[in-house]
Amino acid sequence: MVVTSRDEAPATLKPEYDRASELKAFDDTKLGVKGLVDAGVTEIPRIFYSPPDDMDNSASGDTQFSIPVIDVQGIEKDVTKRKKIVESIRDASETWGFFQLVNHGIPVSVLEEMKEGVRRFYEQDAQVKKEFYTRDHLRPVVYNTNFDLYSAPATNWRDTFYCLMAPNPPKAEDLPAACGDILEQYSKLVMKLGTLLLELLSEALGLNPNHLNDIDCSEGLAVLCHYYPACPQPELTIGASKHADDAFLIVLLQDHIGGLQVLHQDKWVDVPPVPGALVVNIGDLLQASLLIILLITNDRFKSVEHRVLANRVGPRVSVASFFSTGRRPTSKIYGPIKELLSANNPPKYRETRVSNYAKYFSEKGLDGTSALPHFRL
Ligand SMILES: O=C(O)CCC(=O)C(=O)O
Ligand SMILES: [Fe+2]
């Protein structure tokens, strides 16, 4: 695990420089953070310096807590087991908003090949890769550094490409040759798993098992493939700033490097790599659309803030599958689930078009604050 310290933070931390033109010059290289590493930088450009708040790690890597690991083996056949698993998922979603899933049915060979495919994409010939570099969200493959490069207060030490794999996946020939086949195969399996998870989450809420799938929580699947190159000064920057996710549900495949942390009871808790496991987290839209205020004032399932530390030993590869129509949001309207409301449990959020929510989230960027309060009644 990477230890961060601000002790040697240079005086240049304050952006007393023309940040906008340095961002533009970096973006124009179309080579991403990996391009800097390939060029042999030993000091990171100042656009990547994180504000001290972002790096606050007073409670980093706390070992008092660990995020739940849930084994779903046999869930389709054994009713008693299913009930127990639903309970574990409910507990984890209420207290953590995050859990790890083992024996989820996606073969280890597929997980390994998916991570390899992402590595192949980033490590291929730069001229071929450049062709995919864009900020046009209508392209079948969108590869760039930081979707919020020009709006976020600090640039993250990571590159990302993403594809909207459902509904209407790109044509096979439009996917990168480096990973197109495995991306298609993996997406189908993740869609199946996500559909099962949404059934279990519906059951956990006391709803009909099909409820969340019937309201199209699994209609869209955006697959984001991240690459966090080894960083020469991980104490000065971050792989992904603190944020919550703009989707219903996220299934994350991470490699062995580590660095993902979840904010739990005001402490940063590591999500340790578990071989063969997938990390599942509840996104903002699910939290908002469930809107179940218990008798206490908390939202029932949590969309929890998390971040990724930069590391010296990477690259770190991760694949985040967002159940959401991504940056091509629908105009569908979501609000509190009526069955979950009562006089004692009134709606906490206003009805919202997914497209309005996504626009707000993307203009705000990863600035360390949640998008949800904006939609509260
Ligand atoms: O790379 C990771 O582990 C997390 C990625 C993430 O938080 C995201 O894509 O929203
Ligand atoms: Fe995230």
Image (spheres, helix red, strand yellow):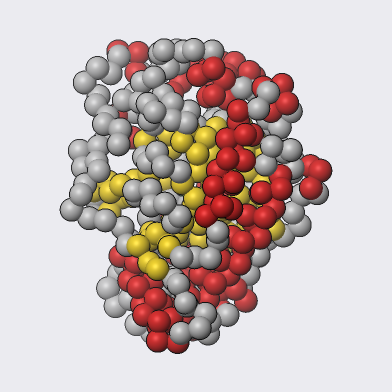
Residue 74: image location, x then y, percent: 47, 77
At 71% across and 32% down in the image, what residue appears? 132
- Front residue of 32/361: it is 32
Residue 354: image location, x then y, percent: 60, 59
- Front residue of 230/358: it is 230
- Front residue of 350/278: it is 278
Counting every numbered tag in the picture gives 0
The image quadrant of residue 356 is bottom right
- Front residue of 320/38: it is 38
Look at the image and tell me whether residue 262 can be seen: yes
The image quadrant of residue 296 is bottom left
Q: Is residue 258 left or right of residue 199?
A: left
Residue projecting furthest to the front: 109
Q: Is residue 109 above or below residue 89?
A: above
Look at the image and tell me whether residue 300 can be seen: no
Residue 314: image location, x then y, percent: 43, 30
Image quarter where the N terminus lies is top left
